[in-house]
Amino acid sequence: MALLFDLSPVPSLPIHGNEARFPVHRIYCIGRNYADHAKEMGAQTVSRANPVFFMKPADAIVPGGGDVPYPSATHDLHHEVEMVAALAKGGRDIDAAHALECVFGYGVGLDLTRRDLQAAMKAKGMPWDIAKGFDASAPVSALRQASEVGHPSHAELSLTVNGETRQRADIADMIFPLPDIVAELSKLFELKPGDLIFTGTPAGVGPLVRGDGFSAELHGIAMLDGYIV
Ligand code: MN
């Protein structure tokens, strides 16, 4: 079947120790997954009853960091450092006990957010897309394969901006650990190879401005460096 025109190449991420790249299908994100961050965002109650999911387009990734353009239409771009899981298998109604079998590897990413637009949308009870799903809103590091580093349940997650620590926590503090996120997401969507999952951010989110240099790390697994330009 002929296509009228070619689309951009499939978005992809580098993989440590592998010549091949990881093709990105969809980007799923969970919100309010660390209690201290949910509190700083003004959530009255934090519970496991209702996980908050949203998505970014696959071509929002900025593979490996580097220069990240300051987005249009905001005066309050925020950083949210997150562990990113990359799936090599998918499915529907995946049991949490088997969820990690779907995970190819791990990276660290920034869930960049137009916080002013998010606040406006929240106030009106409207969707978050314009606050979360903009171009270049998802810088993600090279991936480290689970076959190499296992499936971390504890690891320090941190972000420095211009050398100053802004966020630091342990992924063990997630309200929904990764197996639970996969299980919950797969009730709502058929997960596919190539899906990325942003697993939520701890407290300390704050503004980024042009010229800022950031360095995100999932200790022992992944690093992401870049500049807001
Ligand atoms: Mn986030």
Image (tube, rainbow, N blue to C red):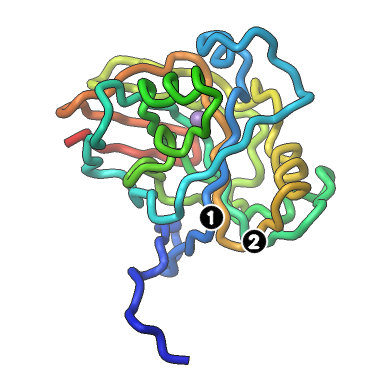
From the top left corner, tell me how far across and down residue 12 is, in percent: 42, 61
25 and 212: which one is in front? 25
The quadrant where residue 34 appears: top right
Task: Kindly identify the residue that appears in the image at 45 percent across and 51 percent down.
Answer: 57
Looking at the picture, which amino acid does disc 2 mark? Lys
Left or right of residue 97, residue 133 in this image: left
State the SS at label 2: loop
Dot 1, how many residues are within 10 Å of its Cα: few (below 14), some (14-19), or many (20+)? many
- Where is the C terminus found, in terms of image quarters? top left
From the top left corner, tell me how far across and down residue 203 is, in percent: 50, 15
Q: Is residue 34 above or below residue 181?
A: above
Count all numbered tags in the image, as a single digit.
Answer: 2
7 and 107: which one is in front? 7
State the SS at label 1: loop
User: Residue 26 got which mark?
Assistant: 1
The response on whether ligand 1 sits within 8 Å of label 1 is no
Q: Which residue is mark 2?
A: 192
Looking at the picture, which amino acid does disc 1 mark? Arg
> Considering only order in the chain, which callout, 2 or 1, is on the residue closer to the N terminus?
1
Distance from disc 1 to disc 2, alpha carbons, whole Å, reads 8 Å
